[in-house]
């Protein structure tokens, strides 16, 4: 193993030198990128990421940090998502849904094996989904609430029956709830992973890196690189330095304030990708003075989303409501309570609250760029904003669990998460029975397009009630070195599917 | 001597016991718990409560403390609340980075501090000596982070001589690269620590210069430098040894900061993320092991001090 590693490192260094030499000549960096180099099957790709998972257990540990690397690459489900977010068959050869939306039948592909060589059976699939369904502590358990039974009807068919239709079922099966694990495996899920994907996880150095190697017995087209190492950086500048010095070929996300160090330099290209990350400035609607809708609307009108986005290096697009562009039910709601500080002052005066002091509680991982803008924007309409920057765990305790806050700012990164606005007990403290009803109808819809339509109606109602200001939808930047192809940039902060990855010399 | 040793060891045990209480109870003052971290922003309160019960976090706090101490007595550091793997395994792995880092920093610090300290004492009436001690004052006040960034810019990014960050995946199985990875971080700590050692050495050397035995030696025809080195140095080194005892805590704190800066997978970075995750069974054992290390080194320095100083030996 080691000689190859040195060879690869040597080649990478040589390429870097060559590129550095070329970049002096202006245009030639692109020449390096489009070189007729062949895909190198022995390549190692080093990726710099920010958010490290606390452990590897996809059943009990929530959060996108695990989804980002493990889903698609190591663990797979019956269905998955294509780059545009559409449902595609993965372990299923095909699937059918009954017209009443209550019966889903999946035909399995044959010849699928787990990375330890064991053959996948319909039993494994049914067992996996049943585990999530029956254990309330498992991530995805609530998403299967409408499922009444999961059975392997024969060796290559799995049948899922529902007690009532659920338009999100396939989407949910494409995520955590539908991941297929091996029933007979005895490995420790917290520190290792056995799945059916094109890569196998070979090591996890907590606080440092996760290493994948090609699963050479993969049932589909084999991975085109030998190894992928995910390096976790607590400091963005360290990741950028590592990329500059040639240790990393991909960095995602790149801190916008540092992007000039990588943009078109050292052979890197920066790409802005879509995400479902919504920076939600939540208002505690049950607490005075925020229980007055005029105050909430005034805050929204006082904030210029363009100023917030600019402060964050331009890495975002305005978002007027709870649903981002790539999710069902999106429509442009930015005209609701749009930037209008004069009207904001008027509303505050009407409410008798022209001198207000409010506290913003936010996790310290977000830095101060956004909160600085909010302090100045709200200051202009007579609101004194105190910023209480706390550890994420403290935020979970004070805001999320105890709902003890005025304003809160958090990035809600999950896709298809409108349900939080239809869950009155959620920390938003938002409760509108009409929204709950529309959401229930959206879930129960069986006709195509009906779900999106109901969700759009519900989202509009939510935005009009102003329980929050959706500051912006993040558009993370990914830096990719020339010679690296097939690294996804859309949704890279929630799922990085490396099926098409290749590295040329 | 025996009595002295016994007192030192008894003090060590009492120190550890007090530390265990402080560590355990101050951690519990922090808001939030690991169950909330595991559940994240998608879990219902019922799910979080179920996780809490499963992890035993709802039991009385004195009972949890008793479990921990009971384990420690059997030399069991416990398991992580998140990964359920033994704390000792991971701590052992991370110490392979942090201990060599601290050792190397101390070595560099001594190499920089002691000779320069002696030189600056010998030239204390000259401009060069004045400049040297002034520079040491200034460097000792430099934050470690700043020193680190400066070194990265000079050695790694400009000269491209050393890695900017990271540690080889295979660790010490690639000794050359592992050592290279530690040089800049160790220099970062050593710059600041070395300046402190320099100042201590300088004042100890100045004191020695004023002693009768050095002056006598000088009056018998030795140069001042020679007299200081042959007769004064043992006394100077003695005070350097006691400074090391005090500075060992500083070295470990320095390592925590420097590991974040250089992306080294050591104890410091592990502690920061474990506190963030409220993985208390892990944090408390890690902190106690570090405290034990500092106390043991302190005691060892104390004993060494007594062994090498003939005046102390006689008194005992």
Image (tube, rainbow, N blue to C red):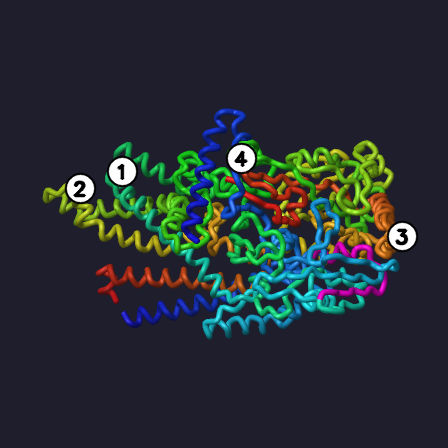
Percent of width and height locating residue A102: 84, 62
Residue count near mark 3 (Cα–Cα under 10 Å), binned few <14, some 14–19, many ≥20: few
Asked whether the residues under marks 3 and 4 belong to the same chain, the reply is yes
Q: Left of A302 or right of it: where is B6? A: left
Q: Is residue A160 magenta?
A: yes
Which quarter of the rendered picture does the N terminus of chain B lie within?
bottom left
Do the CB atoms of the residues marked 2 and 1 lie less than 8 Å apart? Answer: no
- Residue shown at 63%/72% (left/top)? B59
Q: Is residue A281 magenta?
A: no
Residue B224 got which mark? Answer: 2
Asked whether the residues under marks 2 and 4 belong to the same chain, the reply is no
**Which secondary structure, mark 3?**
helix
Q: Which residue is mark 4?
A: A36
Q: Tell me the chain of label 1.
A: B
Residue A434 got which mark? Answer: 3
Residue count near mark 1 (Cα–Cα under 10 Å), binned few <14, some 14–19, many ≥20: some
Mark 2 vs mark 4, foreground winner is: 4
Task: Depth check: give the residue in front, B107 or B238.
Answer: B107
**Which secondary structure, mark 2?**
helix
Residue B124 got which mark? Answer: 1
């Amino acid at each position: 193993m080691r000689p190859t590693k040195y060879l690869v490192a040597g080649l990478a260094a040589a390429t870097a030198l060559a590129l550095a030499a070329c970049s002096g000549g202006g245009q030639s960096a692109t020449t390096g990128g489009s070189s007729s180099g062949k895909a190198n099957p022995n390549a190692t790709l080093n990726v710099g990421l920010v958010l490290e998972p606390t452990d590897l257990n996809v059943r009990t540990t929530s959060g996108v940090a695990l989804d980002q690397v493990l889903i698609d690459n190591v663990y797979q489900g019956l269905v998955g998502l294509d780059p545009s977010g559409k449902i595609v068959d993965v372990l299923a050869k095909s699937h059918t849904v009954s017209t009443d939306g209550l019966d889903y039948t999946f035909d399995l592909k044959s010849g699928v094996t787990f990375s330890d060589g064991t053959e996948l059976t319909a039993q494994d699939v049914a067992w996996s989904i049943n585990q999530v369904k029956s254990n309330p502590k498992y991530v995805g358990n609530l998403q299967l609430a409408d499922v009444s039974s999961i059975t392997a009807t024969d060796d290559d068919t799995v049948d899922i029956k529902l007690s009532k239709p659920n338009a999100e079922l396939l989407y949910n099966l494409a995520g955590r709830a539908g991941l297929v694990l091996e029933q007979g495996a005895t490995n420790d899920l917290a520190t290792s992973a056995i799945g059916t994907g094109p890569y196998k996880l070979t090591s996890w150095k907590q606080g440092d890196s996760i290493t994948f190697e090609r699963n050479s017995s993969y049932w589909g087209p084999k991975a085109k690189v030998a190894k992928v190492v995910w390096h976790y950086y607590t400091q963005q500048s360290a990741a950028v330095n590592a990329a500059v010095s040639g240790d990393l070929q991909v960095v995602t996300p790149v801190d916008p304030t540092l992007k000039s160090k990588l943009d078109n330099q050292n052979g890197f290209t920066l790409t802005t990708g879509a995400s479902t990350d919504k920076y939600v400035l939540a208002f505690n609607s049950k607490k005075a003075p925020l229980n007055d809708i005029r105050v909430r609307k005034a805050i929204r009108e006082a904030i210029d989303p363009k100023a917030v986005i600019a402060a964050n290096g331009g890495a975002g697009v305005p978002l007027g409501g709870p649903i981002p562009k790539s999710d069902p039910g999106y429509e442009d709601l930015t005209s609701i309570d749009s930037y209008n500080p004069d009207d904001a002052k008027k509303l505050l005066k009407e409410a008798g609250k022209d001198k207000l002091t409010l506290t913003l509680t936010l996790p310290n991982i977000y830095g101060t760029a956004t909160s600085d803008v909010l302090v100045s924007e709200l200051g202009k309409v007579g609101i004194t904003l105190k910023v209480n920057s706390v550890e994420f765990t403290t935020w979970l305790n004070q805001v999320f669990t105890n709902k003890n806050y005025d304003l809160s700012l958090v990035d809600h990164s999950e896709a298809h998460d409108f349900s939080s606005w239809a869950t009155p007990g959620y920390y938003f403290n938002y409760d509108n029975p009409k929204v709950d009803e529309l959401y229930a109808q959206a879930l129960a819809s069986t006709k195509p397009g009906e779900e999106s339509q109901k969700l759009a109606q519900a989202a509009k109602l939510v935005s009009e009630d102003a329980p929050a200001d959706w500051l912006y939808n993040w558009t993370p930047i990914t830096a990719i070195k020339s010679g690296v192809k097939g690294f996804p940039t859309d949704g890279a902060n929630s799922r990085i599917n490396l099926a098409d990855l290749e590295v040329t010399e | 001597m025996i009595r002295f040793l016994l007192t030192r060891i008894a003090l060590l045990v009492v120190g550890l016991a007090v530390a265990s209480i402080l560590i355990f109870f101050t951690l519990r003052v922090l808001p939030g718990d690991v169950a909330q971290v595991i559940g994240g922003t998608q879990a219902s309160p019922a799910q979080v409560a179920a996780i809490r019960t499963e992890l035993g976090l709802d039991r009385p706090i004195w009972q949890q403390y008793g479990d921990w101490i009971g384990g420690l007595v059997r030399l069991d550091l416990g398991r992580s609340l998140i990964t359920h793997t033994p704390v000792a395994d991971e701590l052992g792995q991370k110490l392979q980075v942090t201990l060599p880092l601290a050792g190397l920093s101390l070595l560099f610090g001594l190499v920089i501090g002691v000779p320069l300290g002696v030189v600056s004492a010998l030239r204390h009436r000259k401009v060069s000596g004045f400049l040297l001690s002034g520079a040491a004052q200034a460097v000792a006040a430099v934050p470690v982070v700043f020193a680190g960034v400066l070194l990265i810019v000079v050695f790694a990014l400009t000269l491209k001589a050393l890695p900017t960050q990271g540690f080889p995946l295979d660790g010490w199985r690639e000794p050359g690269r592992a050592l290279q990875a530690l040089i800049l971080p160790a220099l970062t700590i050593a710059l600041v620590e070395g300046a402190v050692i320099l100042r201590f050495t300088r004042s100890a050397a100045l004191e020695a210069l004023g002693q009768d035995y050095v002056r006598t030696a000088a009056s018998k025809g030795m140069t001042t430098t020679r007299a200081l080195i042959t007769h004064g140095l043992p006394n100077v080194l003695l005070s350097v040894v006691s400074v090391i005892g005090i500075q060992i805590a500083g070295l470990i704190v320095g390592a925590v900061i420097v590991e974040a800066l250089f992306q080294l997978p050591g104890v410091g970075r592990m502690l920061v993320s474990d506190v963030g995750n409220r993985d208390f069974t892990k944090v408390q054992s890690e902190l106690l092991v570090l405290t034990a290390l500092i106390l043991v080194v302190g005691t060892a320095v104390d004993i060494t001090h007594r062994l090498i100083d003939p005046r102390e030996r006689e008194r005992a």
